[in-house]
Image: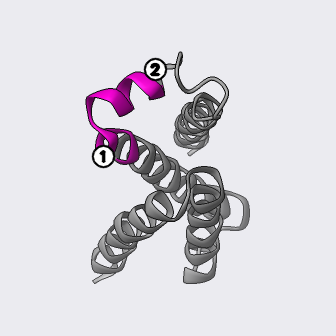
Amino acid sequence: MIRSAVITITFSAIFLIVGLVLWVWSAEDIIDTSPVGALNDINSYLTVLIEALTMLGMFIFLSVTVINLKLFLSGIRAGWMEVISIFIIVVAMAWFMFGAAVGGVTAILSLGFVVYLYLLQE
């Protein structure tokens, strides 16, 4: 259980760092010389997709981390409150960091993972 938590925490941190790097590279004063600017020159939708997938990866690994840690620490399965709280936090981060388009795409993709978790219970 600890090994799983360490792995998911590591992947959550990696996706968070990649998201923060993309956010910094999207700043108006350096976007012309950054890789995000080069991606925007190729296709502006590619940048939105990469940012949304980064935030989706963070949501998946962060929610799995919370579920595993709650089970390990208390012996009780995590409820929907924890999953929905992580969903709200990640979507709000995506919205504030990258804008409404990335926040909306992240919300839709993350809801797909929440539905997968719900169907996994059956």
Label 1's element? helix
* Quadrant containing the C terminus in the rendered view: bottom left
Q: CA distance from mark 1 to mark 2?
A: 14 Å
45 in relation to 41, above or below: below
Q: Which residue is mark 2?
A: 35
Badge 2: few (under 14), some or many (20 or more) residues near its Cα, within 10 Å?
some
Residue at x-position 59% and y-position 43%: 5
Position of residue 9 measured from the top left corner of the image (x, y, whole percent):
61, 40
**Kind of residue at badge 2:** Pro
Position of residue 32 measured from the top left corner of the image (x, y, whole percent):
52, 22
Q: Residue 3, located in which quarter of the rendered image? A: top right
Q: Residue 108, located in which quarter of the rendered image? A: bottom left
Q: Is residue 46 magenta?
A: yes
108 in relation to 121, above or below: above
Residue 120, label in figure: none
Q: Is disc 1 in contact with disc 2, using a CB cutoff of under 8 Å?
A: no
Q: How many marks?
A: 2
User: Horizontally, is 2 left or right of 53 in the view?
Assistant: right
Label 2's element? helix
First in sequence: mark 1 vs mark 2: 2
Magenta stretch, residue numbers: 36-48
Position of residue 17 measured from the top left corner of the image (x, y, whole percent):
62, 32
| Of 98 and 15, the residue lying toward us | 98
Q: Which residue is mark 1?
A: 45
**Kind of residue at badge 1:** Tyr
49 in relation to 118, above or below: above
User: Horizontally, is 84 left or right of 48 in the view?
Assistant: right
